[in-house]
Image (tube, coloured by chain):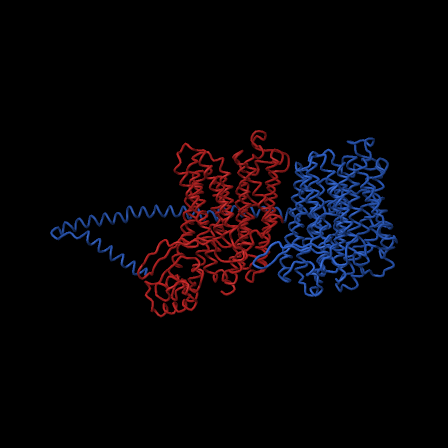
Amino acid sequence: MLLSLLIFLPLLGSLVVALLPERQTAAFRWVALGVTILEVGLAGLAYAAFDRSAGGYQLLEQADWITLPLGRLGIASIDYLVGVDGISLPLVVLSAVVMLAGVVSSWTVTHRQKAYYALYLLLTGTVMGCFVALDFFLFFLFFEFMLLPMYFLIGLWGGPRREYASIKFFLYTLLGSLLILLVMIGLYLSVMDPVSTALAAGFVTDPSALTDEVIRLLQAHIQAGQLNPAQIVHTFDMRYLADGRNYLPDAFLNPAAEPTVLGMPARMLAFWAVFLGFAVKLPIVPLHTWLPDAHVEAPTPISVVLAGVLLKIGGYGILRIAWNFFPDGAAEYATGLAGLGVLSIVYGGLNALAQTDLKKMIAYSSVSHMGFVLLGVASLTAEGINGAVYQMVSHGVLSAMLFLLTGVLYDRTHDRRIDSYRGLMQPMPQFAILTAVAFFGSLGLPGFSGFVGELFTLMGSFQSEWIPGWLTVLGTSGILLAAAYFLWTLQRMFFGAAWSRHDMASVLTDLTLREKLLLVPLGALALGLGLFPNLIFDLTSQTVGQWLIRFAVE
Amino acid sequence: MDEWGYLRPETPTFFGMLQSLLAVCLLLLPFVGFLTVSLASRRLAGPLAVGLTALGLIGSIGLAVSLPEQPITLQADWATLSGISFGIGFRVDGLAGLMLVIVHGVALLVQVYSLSYLLDEPRLSRYFAYLQLFIGAMLGIVLAGNLLVMYAFWELVGLASYLLIGFYADRPAASQAAKKAFLMNRVGDMGMLIGIFLTYYYYDTLDLAQLNHTDLYAVAPTAVGLCLFMGCVGKSAQFPLLTWLPDAMEGPTPVSALLHAATMVAAGVFLLARIQPLLSPDARAVIVLIGTITTFWGGYSALFQTDIKKVLAFSTVSQLGLMVAAMGMGNVGGALFHLLTHAFFKAGLFLSAGSVIHAVHTQDMRQMGGLRRALPVTFVAYTVCAAALAGVPLFSGFLSKEAILGGAFAWAETAGISLAAGVPVLLLLSSGLTALYMARQWRLIFLGQYQHEATPLSGVHEADGLMRVPVVILALLSVAFWFSVNPFSAHGSWVFGILPLPAEAELPWLPPVSVLLVLLGGWFGVRLREPNPTRLYVQLSVQYGFLDRAYQWYIITPAIKAATLLNRADQRLVDGAVNGAGIGGVVLAHLVHAVDRFGVDGLVNGAAWLAGRLGRLTRSVQNGRVQSYITVAVVGLLIVLWWIL
């Protein structure tokens, strides 16, 4: 019930906003605020209800949705199946928090509020759906549907080049999801639902009677052609997709069969397709160029959501889909994937160093920081994968804070160029202090969450048997680059004699109460997570531990 | 390494628990101070900070005096990742106890001094809050029981120094220096972090007690020691990462005193004491080499500086090189003894220099001169501390320097490295160099004629008691008597009850020779005239071997250029490809549309025209066009389906 509420409450809220009369401009944001506060509450309940000592999926809800006999193609079965494990739950909680922050920072949006908040709540619901869906089809539905509100939120409320940016964002992601769709169909055709198939074929009469023995028997029957293909129930259930025993004997993506396409094992091809599909979202260099544009053009709250939540769907997808269904691919290409991660770290960092636009600098720093996520998951170690999930949460909080800070300045002057400001410390001391907190948190100062994420992803990378030491050393240079671009920016914008292209006395006023209410809790959260990292690791430990056993087997 | 007693604790006694609690309180106190002082009013902030540190000093002395044989250790879980546990651990042993007292002692005096020195500073509460943070971060390093905790506080020291060096934020030079300090330290920290990863990779633990098992000694890979040593190179301003330290002078002068004596540069040397068993012979050779280069580099750079604080800064670099070299030789006792004596006389020198600056309002020594009458107390204190630094007998620096030099000659005999004998000789020579530049500075400030026109000599007078008392105390602590009853040898010193006694060579000629060198250096320093500043050998000293210029040319400028170039490539090539694909797609769409309009549609129209003609031809036949279309469509679909399935 809890997870369904997480999805449908915002969707309902979106509907309410859509139905409210246009005149009620004040009501829209209050509805949005109310819904997102409830979302945080619900996510908090899920956090509390989660059994940390058990791995696997929890808070499951399942309902038959579509069952369609397709003749020789077997029976298509799509379920409404939601649940969380140690990897998705931290991201659910993060999303709830960031979405709430987004609403509060949306207070400055003044035109077409109705459409704005309706789309925003739609986005909230689909994001939640993405993180809790355990049926691949359902996941894909949410994943695709998310694009729609995002496209309009950037395209209608964005900056001068918003149309270019939003179309770029849309096409990039769509291209990625095309690859994911192909793999989804391939997986669907390759995997059976052992329970339903056994029932339909009359092997067992009671689902609880299903044992490994029965599945083996079932496989043997299919192998021998003794089972009518029309009786095989195909599934999108992620739990079945992740289990090699459920792959049909002669299937395209069967790990044992190894058919090749263009000289490459089909599974490896599928692995790369699905990886690239999500790598666009993470984003991984060289698939990152939509990000700076989207960030620069998006309004502040949407940048916050984009960096805080949407990038995490890329990382989540890589773990949940690519790694989960193709552990053999993850192990096979670990070195190259880690190389891509390090490339992102260094490339993003160097680019951030060269930026003259504050928001673009932060966008590139996101590229760099998400590189740590890929490095961590590529390592296939406990430190690396736990660290990667942690890094996603940490980056979610800190990047939200960074974009909010940029928004503070943009709201006042509509100018984000770094060289338009000097010595901001004097007119805006509180702003300066909170910026320094966010910067130091992001550059990995111990005590803040950024440090923990980088520490453990790098440590995992060092421990990994697949990643050469020099690659990790190169990745470690990311922390030096981060210090360089953040501190250089701090020096240029905040220190020295106060000067600005804009009127200091009237325009550059210090933080308002609303801004402080946004920034201080986020800073405190980054600090709290940094001091007590087990707040996250408690959730991830068991799940990741069980995953690692699979990588060891493959 | 048994004298360190790195063993697991026994069941804690009640008294032991009390001591643990005290240690935790000592660590937390400055952080509580950071919060409360930053919220306190301008007038209250200083006294509050001083009070807290005084409390800390009392606690530290209490803890240090009552320390048991076994170190006190504290462990707590911090992060557990799929069964792999990373704890936070603290340990208090003799070394930590000694450091606790030094840090608190120097910090207390510096803060008392600051009460008066920064009286007119509007952001006084922030200043004292940052100082508390600085102290707390350093205490964390001192009490750290594992490398992860040490690294965390290591970086926190970097933050605190950043805040304090850049305290005068409206001065561009100050924020530049702060950034430089943090970044250079980060270079070292990066190495240290890799060293931590390597340590964990090889030993599966970061706990200092476990790492100090003697059986690790033989197998420690050189890379582990060298990477960890990089942390020390950054924090203790060793060659080649030494140029942040002279720039750090941009901070308020009392901060320099603290930074140079107790809370920052000492950390690197302390780290080396903690990781001794992880240093392989090769790593040690590198450490000795770096330390020796630094000793000489710093000493020569101090020689022709004109800024009063820069001479002191480079003297710190030089002395740190000496300590690091000793650490590389395994002379832990000698290095830490020098760290202890250096902390007092260097803090004393900086605070005295602060008094001079406070009085004459310039840092340029060429403008000073003849101040011995105007500032008698400062003059005496300065003379005592400088004598200690130069290694004049009867002063503390002599004892500790002899402990290092003696150890160095002993090391050279057994090291088995070619040219090893050159190291102690170089160290000995640079101690003569120390006397030379200190005597020069002493002459420039206190002898000769007063030059500064902006502040007339009649207006130059001693500061108030708050500034004088700390200086006098530090000067008193620079006398040999406190450390050893025999002013010519430290062998019976109480210090070596806590620290391991260095293995010194029996060299009866060494003390007379080094005294001779000191006297010679001092004599030249007082007598020699200032050379022409444009001469290369002077510039080589003033610009500390052109190290900064080399960084600017070969690292910073190329790095920024590379970043700019990469960004252009990102926009033109990577994004260009994307946009190109987009434009290509649109062009293709138009092309297809044209083909569709003129080709396909033309074909269709042609076909229609043809069909019309045919129709006219077969007018008599039943028209089957629609049916045939359907037939074709169905057949086509079947083919497609068959192919897919």
**Residue A257 x/y as whole percent:** 41, 67
The relative height of residue B163 versus residue B625 in the rendered view (above or below) is above
Q: Nearer the viewer, residue B124 or B633?
A: B124
Q: Quadrant of residue A383?
A: bottom right
**Residue B309 x/y as whole percent:** 76, 42
Q: Nearer the viewer, residue B42 or B462?
A: B42
Is B293 displayed left or right of A346 in the figure? right
Is B463 displayed left or right of A432 in the figure? right
**Residue A168 x/y as whole percent:** 43, 45
Q: Quadrant of residue B359?
A: top right
Quarter of the N terminus of chain B within the rendering: bottom right
In blue, which chain? B
Q: Report whether residue A126 is seen.
A: no
Report which colour depicts chain A: red
Name which residue lies at 20% across and 54% down.
Answer: B628
Q: Report whether residue B76 is seen.
A: yes
**Residue B638 x/y as whole percent:** 27, 58
State the residue lying farthest toward the top. Answer: A506
Is B560 displayed left or right of B616 in the figure? right
